[in-house]
Amino acid sequence: MPLDEHKPFHASSVQSLTVLVQREVERRILTGALPAGERLSESALAADMGVSRGPVREAMRGLEQAGLVDIIANKGVVIREIGYDEAVDLYDLRGTLFGFMCETMARRRTDAQCAVLRNKLNAMAAAIRADDTDLYYRLNIQFHAAIVEQCGNSRARAIYDGIVKEMHLFRRRGLSRIENMEASMREHAAIAEAIISGRAEAARKAGVVHLRNGRDRFLATLDPAPESLSTPDQGSADRSTAAAE
Amino acid sequence: MPLDEHKPFHASSVQSLTVLVQREVERRILTGALPAGERLSESALAADMGVSRGPVREAMRGLEQAGLVDIIANKGVVIREIGYDEAVDLYDLRGTLFGFMCETMARRRTDAQCAVLRNKLNAMAAAIRADDTDLYYRLNIQFHAAIVEQCGNSRARAIYDGIVKEMHLFRRRGLSRIENMEASMREHAAIAEAIISGRAEAARKAGVVHLRNGRDRFLATLDPAPESLSTPDQGSADRSTAAAE
DNA sequence: AAGCTGTGAACTGTCGACAGTTGTCAATTC
DNA sequence: GAATTGACAACTGTCGACAGTTCACAGCTT
């Protein structure tokens, strides 16, 4: 496992150990290497990563604020596990934020931003014609990321990213990724069109509708029984909750 | 100052020092005792509060996640200062979240919750008839808090509370609190009516409009020059940014 | 006199160690 | 045999100390 990261996120290649530890534990949680409900020991983590307990403690505090773990006094940290209802709540909240970002971007759009959206849209259309699901999936993520990053409201972006991460704690996800590329594509086109033409309220509505449909598409892939928790399997890393959008 | 707190928030009357320190520093920032732009020294804070540097460091990390301070590597923490544009962004984001909460509450309302809203509304009307600005101001806060706490989406509530706190970092606020009680009251009535009758989309719109108007009422009380930063005065604690709503 | 450089103080980042608490397990008692 | 109690182990909460970095100021050079 490489130790030095080359993310263009916060510059500064020599980060503090706290940030390094937090990033690594977050990665393990999001990829499922550390399953939800797992109890983490500061000492074990510190020994595992070859650092002292101080940075680990600070990292845990950061993960708690991000909603990824719960800290119980004198007992330690446990990886949060969210249930069906909470996942739906998060999806709705995320949809509202995404709609807000579409609305904001429509108000502040620049020509360069519009060009990016158009490019992504064309590429997605091509991916559909080529029936390339994986490519469409990646472009789909890029399309969303473009709006989130370019909307101009940095706080909204930070909160949105946090919610997306938190949603990974919902473990029971469907396997199929894009159920209906055409429907997803039409919604994307509506969003981009509204943003490009500056119709803010239409952009907001299109964004909200898109994520609501994405939520329904996602929930439809789940087991019909929303009460049964704890699916036994916990293997294979790197699956995304943000599937069918 | 009493040491043991009795907040029904996270239970546990004997909190860790980290939480205590974080709460205290947060209080000082929000009340203005620690002005924006101020540089905080861990050692000084630790000595001031009679604790070690460890809990102080953890508390600072938490305040950074909350957006109240910036941590600069090897240099320390500075209390964040937000400018005019950022304050407007936060207000808009807050408005969107508030609208979402109104919408959610309209969907999940119970009779008891509706009764609470009706009570607050009646009390506010009475306060207007009595021309009691202070009472109206307090009831206004309670009305908002009722929606935020009862909407049923706990994550949305946590984020909303964080944004409200963050908005206190915008220092140039108007002195007058409620400019137009009647207009504020009409908007409150519209919100409550929509929630009680279960019209979710109407509730959302009413909530968004209310905070947009509140934002405009608030911004109208500012100096006409949005470029001049750093008003010299920094006295008198406990003023609220959430003024004219 | 202006610019550059080296030294020093102050502070952060990190570590190891100690005290207090919690949960467990075995021995004891009814 | 079951419940209670006591001690032990593991862990967290907290502290003091050391190393590395940053910034400022004084002295030197041109």
Image (tube, coloured by chain):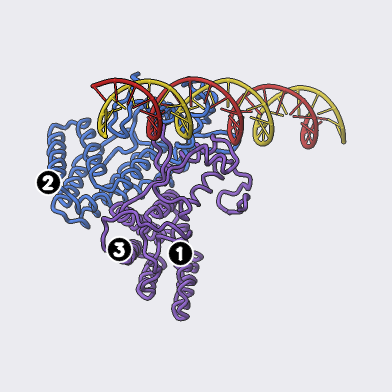
Chain colours: A purple, B blue, C red, D yellow
Disc 3: host chain: A
SS category of the residue bearing label 3: loop
Disc 1: host chain: A
Evaluate whether label 3 is on the same chain as label 1. yes
SS category of the residue bearing label 1: helix
Q: Within the image, what quadrant is residue B131 found in?
A: top left
Type of amino acid at the residue the image marks with label 3 = Asp
Residue A133 percent location from the top left of the image: 45, 74
Is residue A206 something one can see in this rendering? no
Type of amino acid at the residue the image marks with label 1 = Ile
Q: How many residues crowd mark 3 within 10 Å: few (<14), some (14–19), many (20+)?
A: few
Query: Seen in the image, is C1 located left or right of residue A224?
Result: right
Say which residue label 1 marks.
Answer: A141
Residue B170 percent location from the top left of the image: 41, 38
> In the image shown, does B229 or B46 lie closer to the viewer?
B46
Say which residue label 2 marks.
Answer: B111
As drawn, the label of residue A223 is 3
Type of amino acid at the residue the image marks with label 2 = Asp
- Report the Cα–Cα distance between label 2 and label 1: 42 Å
